[in-house]
Amino acid sequence: MLIKTKQFQISPKELRGIIAVDYYKRMKFFLILFSVLAVIDIILSIIQQKFSWWLLYFLGFLAYMLSVPYWLRLEGRTSALNFQNRYCEMDENFIAIFFEDGSITKLRYEHFIKVVKKGEFYFLYITKAQFHYLPIAAFESEKDMHRFDLFLEGKQLIKLW
């Protein structure tokens, strides 16, 4: 199996947006819960004509939850190389990333702790915080993408079902 991708690049702003959307999707339950609690507390405060301190806690927590993606520092999560133009080659043992400045990163699949496929991209996690980004659009064909999915499933890095 040899899969070669097209060249691709992502900006820090685009990556931050992808991470923020993913964060909001994961936190949707808590955001809805605390929004409902804040609305109920506002209604009860109006009916009782009494200020509730719980309202400040609910609104403060909501503000905190909504602002978390804006303080993300991508420098600790990913290398500056990940914002360069690059392409990948995958075989049975390695994934090699070729950057436009001539740098090459070659990783064994055993170095990945997990692979997350979200919508139009893969996150290949090396640690809980560090990852390599791989867009699905970078694959030459849908057949290559499916071969890569099946290979990752065989290595138990991703669950397709």
Image: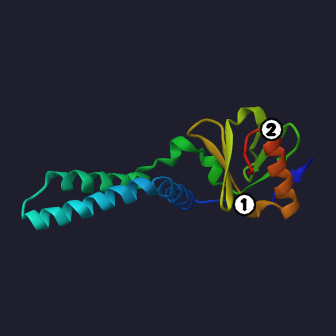
Residue 151, located in which quarter of the rendered image?
A: top right
- Percent across and percent down for residue 41 are 21, 59
Taking the spot 36% from the left edge, 56% from the top edge, the residue there is 33
Left or right of 64, for residue 88? right
Taking the spot 75% from the left edge, 64% from the top edge, the residue there is 137
Nearest the viewer among 135 and 12 is: 135
Local packing at callout 1 (Cα closer than 10 Å; few below 14, some 14-19, many 20+) is some
Q: Which numbered marker is on residue 8?
A: 1
Which callout, 1 or 2, points at the residue further toward the start of the chain? 1
Q: Looking at the picture, does residue 41 appear above or below residue 61? A: below
Residue 66 visible to an observer of this rendering: no
Q: Which residue lies furthest to the right in this view?
A: 1
User: Which residue is denoted by mark 2 in the rendering?
Assistant: 155
Residue 152 visible to an observer of this rendering: yes
Count the marks. Answer: 2
Nearest the viewer among 85 and 116 is: 116
Local packing at callout 2 (Cα closer than 10 Å; few below 14, some 14-19, many 20+) is few
- Percent across and percent down for residue 127 are 61, 35
Mark 1 lies on a secondary structure that is: loop
- Percent across and percent down for residue 56 are 19, 54
- Percent across and percent down for residue 65 are 37, 53
Q: Which numbered marker is on residue 31?
A: none
> Mark 2: which amino acid?
Lys
Q: Do the residues labelled 1 and 2 touch (CB within 8 Å)?
A: no
Query: For the residues marked 1 and 2, what is the alpha-carbon distance in whole angstroms?
Result: 25 Å
**Dot in front, 1 or 2:** 2
Q: Which residue lies furthest to the top in this view?
A: 110
> Mark 1: which amino acid?
Phe
Mark 2 lies on a secondary structure that is: loop
